[in-house]
């Protein structure tokens, strides 16, 4: 998958359309039902995705203008906005998702070429602005899964699944709390090594299922491990 933020905007638009399609079939009862995220309903997930789009607008604006601007006013404000929006009607959720997605698209379109090299401060630390479109795509695809409304890892575009898997494996490789493992893609000789290879179990499966399992979204039953034994337990990532 490309790393060019302008080329990735098409992927973001497609992911947004898929999310809106799922959200459109959820009524108030469905929105109040539990998501895959502990303590969050589906309404919480959708409210988060709308405010996340606005948060990225803040960061893109900071990159474009050079004026410091946080993604969220504060962690408490972020949590409060999600909680306040979670119980809205289905129509209100859809309208908010569409409008916030449009604001994100407008902010991307307003970026001059030189602004993509600016560094902005995210809750996870500094990032180059060019990475923000990928970050938004990742939020859309992963949290669409969290809705537990029919979207599966197998529905992820192949390029997205591979990039996510490589990103997570790279991030986890430097953490002391991560068990050693070798991740091998089905039908290929390509593999990713986390920790020391010697004696590490080999976990094999399709790239989307490996990625979903590695970020705590289930799928261990779709993987195989050699030598036979329990699948390693990766720490929380996102």
Image: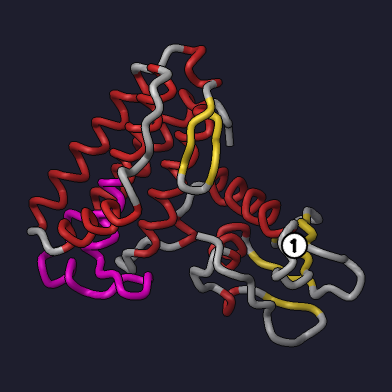
Magenta stretch containing residue 29, yes or no? yes
Q: Is residue 205 above or below residue 120?
A: below
> Could you tell whether 16 is left or right of 190 in the image?
left
Q: Residue at x 46, y 47 (%)?
A: 123
* Residue 82 x, y percent position in the rendering: 24, 57
State the extent of the magenta-drawn residues as a range. 23-51
Q: Residue at x 53, y 33 (%)?
A: 131
* Residue 78 x, y percent position in the rendering: 29, 52
Magenta stretch containing residue 48, yes or no? yes
- Dot 1 alpha-carbon crowd within 10 angstroms: few under 14, some 14 to 19, many 20 or more: many
Q: Quadrant of the N terminus?
A: top right
The coloring applied to the image is secondary structure
Which residue is most to the right?
198
* Residue 41 x, y percent position in the rendering: 25, 69
Instruction: Tell me which corner region of the image, top left, top right, bottom left or bottom right, holds residue 195.
Output: bottom right
* Residue 95 x, y percent position in the rendering: 13, 44
Identify the residue under disc 1.
Answer: 184
Q: Residue at x 30, y 50 (%)?
A: 49
Q: Residue at x 70, y 62 (%)?
A: 186
Q: Is residue 21 above or below residue 60?
A: below
């Amino acid at each position: 998958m490309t790393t060019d933020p302008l080329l990735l905007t098409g992927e973001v638009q497609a992911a947004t359309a898929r999310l809106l399609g799922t959200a459109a079939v959820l009524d108030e009862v469905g929105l109040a039902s539990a998501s895959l995220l502990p303590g969050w309903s589906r309404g919480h997930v959708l409210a988060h995705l709308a405010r996340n789009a606005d948060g990225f607008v803040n960061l893109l604006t900071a990159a474009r203008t050079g004026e410091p601007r946080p993604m969220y006013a504060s962690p408490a404000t972020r949590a409060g906005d999600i909680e306040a929006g979670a119980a809205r009607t289905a129509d209100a959720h859809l309208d908010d998702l569409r409008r916030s997605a449009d604001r994100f698209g407008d902010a991307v379109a307003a970026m001059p070429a030189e602004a993509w090299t600016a560094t902005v401060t995210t809750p996870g630390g500094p990032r180059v602005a060019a990475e923000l479109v990928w970050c938004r795509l990742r939020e859309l695809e992963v949290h669409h899964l969290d809705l537990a409304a029919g979207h599966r890892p197998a529905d992820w575009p192949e390029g997205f699944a591979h990039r996510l898997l490589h990103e997570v494996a790279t991030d986890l490789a430097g953490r002391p709390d991560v068990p050693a493992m070798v991740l091998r893609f089905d039908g290929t000789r390509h593999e990713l090594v986390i920790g020391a290879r010697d004696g590490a179990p080999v976990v094999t499966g399709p790239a989307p299922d490996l990625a979903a399992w590695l970020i705590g979204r289930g799928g261990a039953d779709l993987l195989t491990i050699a030598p036979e034994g329990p699948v390693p337990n990766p720490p929380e990532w996102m």
